[in-house]
Every structure is written in structure tokens, then in C-alpha cells.
């Protein structure tokens, strides 16, 4: 249950909080972009099985590998693409938290 809350909290609640605290203008667009960070999970359709709760996504799926993460950091460091980079990095963070739970005994 804690794992579920941590994972989906970062996927859905943290983006909303960031939108409200850091983006006073364009709130709606920023919220939409940050929430659409979940879309990088499309790479799961390449995996078999598509969804496995005991598998760590990081460095398993193509959009979750270290090269992709490096690209997201670059996007985040450029002002114009920062929101997109942030959306993807939040997704990666949610998945990392999930992996920590997989590898521990919660
Ligand atoms: Zn993911």
C-alpha cells in the first residue's frame, strides 16, 4: 500500500503540487504536460509481459534507460524544454521509488 501511494503520488500528486507552487502562470498547460510524463510508459508495450509489478522499469524499458534519463536531464536544463524534462524526470523518480520497494521488504 505504501508502495502504491508513493508511486502514484509522484505520478499524479507531485506534478499538481509543483504546478501550483512553481508555475503561477500557464497552470493548466504545465499540469497537462507534467501529468503526461506518464506517457513514456508506452515503451512497456515492447516488453513481455507488458506489466510486471515485480520488475524494475529503470534501465529495462527503452524510454527508462540511462541514455533516456540523460536526455531528460538535458531537456530539464534547457529553459524552453524544462517542463518536459521535469515531466519525464518525475516519471523516472516515481519508477525509481517503485524499484526501491521491489528490492526491499516493505
Ligand atoms: Zn515508467
Image (cartoon, helix red, strand yellow):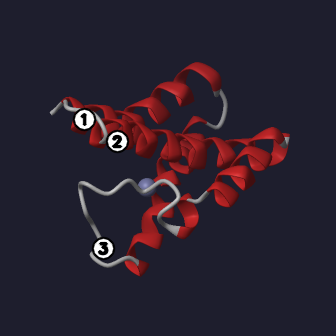
Compared to 30, does 40 lie above or below?
Answer: below
Q: Write down the residue under mark 3.
A: 50
Residue indicated by mark 2:
98
**Do the numbered discs 3 and 1 sit on residues whose CB atoms are within 8 Å?**
no
**Secondary structure beneath disc 2?**
helix
Point out residue 25 in the picture as x, y percentages from the top left corner: 67, 30
Q: Nearer the viewer, residue 34 or 60?
A: 60
* Residue 94 occupies quadrant: top left
Q: Is residue 81 left or right of residue 66?
A: right
Q: Residues within 10 Å of mark 3 (few under 14, many from 20)?
A: few
Q: What label does residue 3 carry, if any?
A: 1
Kindly report the distance in space between the C-alpha atoms of the residues bearing marks 3 and 1.
Answer: 20 Å
Callout 2–callout 1 Cβ contact below 8 Å: yes
Tell me the element at label 3.
loop
Q: Quadrant of ligand 1?
A: bottom left
User: CB at mark 1 closer than 8 A to ligand 1?
Assistant: no
Which callout, 2 or 1, points at the residue further toward the start of the chain?
Answer: 1
> Is residue 24 or residue 46 the one in the foreground?
46
- Element type at marker 1? helix
Q: Indicate which disc residue 46 carries.
A: none
Q: CA distance from mark 2 to mark 3?
A: 16 Å
- Name which residue lies at 63% across and 41% down: 86
Q: Residue at x 25, y 54 (%)?
A: 54
Label 2 and label 1: CA atoms lie apart by 6 Å
Amino acid at each position: 500500500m505504501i508502495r502504491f501511494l508513493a508511486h502514484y503520488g509522484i505520478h499524479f500528486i507531485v506534478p499538481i503540487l509543483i504546478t501550483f507552487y512553481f508555475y503561477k502562470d500557464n497552470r493548466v498547460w504545465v499540469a497537462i504536460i507534467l501529468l503526461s510524463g506518464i506517457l513514456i510508459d508506452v515503451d512497456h508495450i515492447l516488453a513481455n509481459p507488458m506489466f510486471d509489478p515485480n520488475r524494475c522499469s529503470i534501465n529495462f524499458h527503452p524510454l527508462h534507460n540511462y541514455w533516456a534519463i540523460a536526455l531528460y536531464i538535458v531537456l530539464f536544463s534547457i529553459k524552453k524544454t524544462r517542463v518536459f524534462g521535469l515531466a519525464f524526470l518525475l516519471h523516472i523518480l516515481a519508477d525509481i521509488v517503485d524499484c526501491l520497494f521491489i528490492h526491499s521488504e516493505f
